[in-house]
Amino acid sequence: MKNIFLVVLFLLNSELFSQVVINEVMYAPTSPMKEWFEIYNTSSSPVNLQNWKWKDAAVSNPIRTITTQNILLNPGAYAIICEDSANIKSSFPGITGFILQSSGWNALNNTGNESIVLFNSTNAVIDTLGYANSWGGSGGNSLEKINPSGPANQQGNWGTTLDPSKGTPNRKNSITPKQNDLLLKSFLITPDIPVTGDTLKFNSLIKNTGLNAANNYTYGIYKDINFDSVAQQSELLYQTSPSALNPNDSITILYAVPNIDSGKKQYIGKIIFPGDEDTLNNVKMKSVTISGQAVLTGLIINEIMYAPQSPEPEWVELYNISSGTINIKNWKIADSSAQNNPVTITPSDHFINPNDFIVIAKSNQIVPVHLLIDTTKILYVSSLPTFNNDRDKIIIFNNAGGITDEVSYKSSWGGSNRNSLERISASKPSNDSTNWFTSLDCEYSSPTRMNSFVNIQPAFRNDLLINEIMFDPLSISCEWLEFYNNSGRYLNMNGWKVKAGTANYNLFSDCNFYIKPGAYLILAADTTIYNRFSYLISTDSTRRIIFNSGLSLSNSGTSIRISDVMNSTIDSMVYSPKWHNTSLPDTKGYSLERINPAMPSTNPSNWSSSADPLGGTPGKKNSIFVQNNSSTELSISPNPFSPDGDGHEDFTIIKYKLKSNTAQIRVKIFDVKGRIVKSLINNQLSGSEAQIIFDGKDDSGTKLRVGIYVALLEAVDDRGGTIEQLKATFVVAAKL
């Protein structure tokens, strides 16, 4: 009886295993992507992949172990078996699910016949795929199975992926019929070459390629005003809710814009269908130019490196702004001196996808100086014309000899001294000097990437604050500055600098240096900062630290200025050693800390000595931090407070709100006997709201005694008459 049970169990397992199928193969990737294949569990039960194996057709190649881990592949789940798991993750950002790196790899044939055999842990064959490159999947695209449950070795059940990412690892195959899928099959605009006053006619064809009927969907046509290729609600021209579509049915949508004006236009057609399993095929875009020649190619000159720093060569970047792929076979390039004898860019087929780049470089020395460059998007032309450093023309010819774009640049436009000349807008004329600027990229140029101006994050005053200054450290430590991200959003620090005295220091260490909201950035002279503040060694997302051996801060005080990539001032001040707490016998080894980020950095009363035992709080909330959260007309917080120098509530903030927009104010502190002990403000111009820091000392600089006090604010007009009085009591306390 036991043996019968084992046989039945084996048969059940064999049936289960046979339902794990090879579902997708990347056998001919383009660099830098590497080979991989995908398996899929078509059964209704999980399958353990521990000690599963695979091999290819070559008899001499070994059987490779997929994984030794206890991994359950659930029903309807995918797993990737690959040559390099890190490569898969970089090739398909955001990929989820199992990614299993094989123990060694058998290279898959790119031409002719090949097979992949899948074994379970008992070395039983689970699935076999024998394919040829004629089935599809070459040229950097994966080979996908149409029906995962269908026959494995039937050419009709396989085809080239239709996904823009060139594969669908751990996702439903792009050629597998979906339950719900609407396709914007065509988006046509006529006439082809319109002139001012014409009527633009839009012809849109929508097809239901899903297995279910499509209901409750909408279709819109948008005028892409800012040419960002994103259909925004504010750009909507027309919207309709077409009738239901049965599987394989189509519907034509007609729309017209009469009396069109001149200039380049860009339009977007977009289907919105809740539950659509493939939204990538719901959008199409098309550009037309009114009262001029139609955009025949959409390939523009986008960036010029005419004065590189050796050994980097000269180069030009082109960008495809059209919605179609462009083949630049037999296209040519020239400068002003070689206009009648242009140089062929490439004699072979070379396709540029929509919204993609190609760089034409004189030599491969462009690669070592650009860590972020995509080497698959470079063509090397040793005979590339030599560009003048001032006043030259770059011309691009198509294969029929027509000029597709040209730029007559001058050095005054930007560029030179190692930086490239970058285009600002694709929609503005190529020869508009205001449409070009010097690259602000951290690599001094951005070949094969979006121009730096597109990636500039607008910054505002006080987004990043000067928060703590260590200008006179102990001998075992070093000088440092601390900054606080006060913006409420991630800040890209590329190109940001701090100026201390006359010296400038970078506030970034690489091109993707970000500071999260509420986090701290520390600029230190060297690693001896760890001797005093050892907690900084550990990784913490709330702080980042960079080092600059040249950092030098004056003990007698100096100016500090933060500037962003556009050289706009974000925060600035001039600190003084006089801002230290006068009760300290020796301020060496103590930092100056900001009391409240909301109050100006230029206000001396907003700074004092750190009360932390280590003498500072780099990467942490300041030891003397105070915030007034009250919303009354005159409020004092914290209340009580204890100005004893221990770092806990040493200061209080007086916050007020006036009825008038502006006024002269006087603020005085009285004891319980009505005697003035401190004149905080005397006839100072103020807006309707402000805050004042009070250190708990009287007019002679002596700490107030423990007790109850009254703050009186008087707002007076320009003739000295009182127009408003605000009063609040507070308590000066001490430790028990």
Image: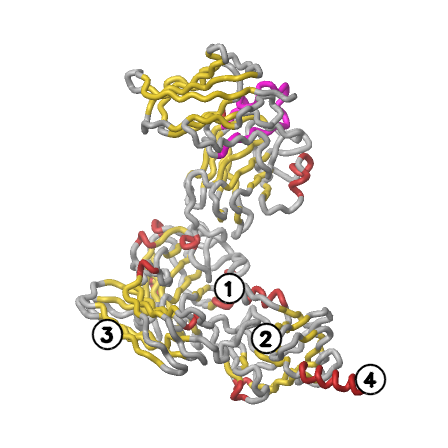
- Magenta-colored segment: predominant secondary structure: loop
CA–CA distance in space, label 3 to label 2 = 48 Å
CA–CA distance in space, label 3 to label 4 = 79 Å
Q: In the rendered view, would you say 64 is above or below 621?
A: below
Labels 4, 2: front one: 4
CA–CA distance in space, label 1 to label 4 = 62 Å
Labels 1, 4: front one: 4
Residue at 54%, 67% in the rendered image:
92
Q: In the rendered view, would you say 234 is above or below 57?
A: above
Q: Are marks 3 and 4 in contact (CB under 8 Å)?
A: no
For mark 2, what is the residue?
76
- Residue 234 can be seen in this image: yes
Disc 4 crowd rating (10 Å Cα; few below 14, some 14-19, many 20+) is few
Q: Secondary structure at mark 2?
A: loop
**Which amino acid lies under the numbered mark 1 shown in the image of this protein?**
Asp
In magenta, the rendered stretch is: 575-597
Residue at 42%, 18% in the rendered image:
712
Q: Quadrant of residue 408?
A: bottom left
Residue 584 is one of the magenta-drawn residues: yes
Q: Secondary structure at mark 3?
A: loop
For mark 4, what is the residue?
2
CA–CA distance in space, label 3 to label 1 = 38 Å
Q: Nearer the viewer, residue 369 or 97?
A: 97
